[in-house]
Image (cartoon, rainbow, N blue to C red):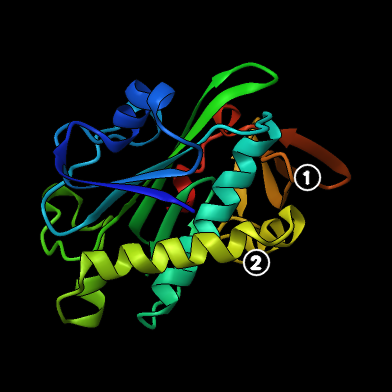
Amino acid sequence: MLNIKRFKELDSTNDYLKNEHVNLPHETFVISDTQHSGRGRGDHKWTSPLGNLYCSYILKNNLQNSTLFHQVCLVSVAVINVLSHYGLKAVIKYPNDILVNQKKIAGILVESRGNTILDFIIVGIGINVNQLDFFDLNEKAISIKQLVNYDISVEEVFDLLIHEYRILSLQTHFSIYLDYLEHSYVIGKEILYQQSIWKIYNITEDGFLELRCKEQIRKVQLNEISLAELY
């Protein structure tokens, strides 16, 4: 049974779970109408006006480092499936942004504490639901409402996300990983790496990119390369 907590406003749903993790059970979900200090990867600010979905959940049982990328895969696929309910075909910008029409419609932030055995994992999800103006990011961001031309219930989107999370949680790690690969935007793309052109051949089960150049294969992390040229 999932534990769900709702708020009108928070600084950040991830930070709330981080601060309260001792008092909260495994698989507690937090949803807030707005956030004052939402953020994405690399502490990039995630603006949080009313009308979008801002939620996070915490895992506390039997966690290892390998669980981190599995959660990225699970939630990415869950969001892809939620968007499909509105007739939208989305892809995954490695590792954890969701794009429609090459614009960002959702983002995922995974945080943890611990080393080999983790104390907790917190997964934050932001989905652009009803926002119509992204100001200086209008060329890079989009919402469900902009694509379907009618108001969307944020609670409905959240209910769909919970539904997809429950279904995917019963599936094997490998089947979810394969779904993640199927929706990848980057596999097959060419990038400049170490002054040569490499093709992104694969994303491994532990979250690394595999690059190929002629007969060479390299396994790299996101912080070793730039994918900016693809977007």
Residue on which disc 1 sits = 213
Across and down, in percent, residue 154 comes to 22, 64
Say which quarter of the image contains residue 10.
top left
Question: In the image shown, does 130 or 141 lie closer to the viewer?
Answer: 130
SS of the residue under disc 2: helix
How crowded is the residue under tag 2: few (<14 C-alpha within 10 Å), some, or many (20+)?
Answer: few
Left/right placement of residue 73 relative to residue 91 reads right
The residue that label 2 is drawn on is: 182
Which of the two marks, 1 or 2, is nearer to us in this view?
A: 2
Residue type for callout 1:
Cys
CA separation in Å, label 1 and label 2: 22 Å
Across and down, in percent, residue 33 comes to 16, 50
Residue in the image at 14% along x and 59% along y: 51
Q: Is residue 4 visible?
A: yes
Name the residue at 28% across, 70% down. Answer: 156
Residue 99 placement (x, y as % from top left): 41, 61
- Residue at position x 62%, y 52% in the image: 190
Does residue 22 lie above or below 14 as drawn? above
> Within 10 angstroms of label 1, few (less than 14), some, or many (20 or more) residues?
some
Whether residue 203 sits left or right of residue 8 in the image: it is right
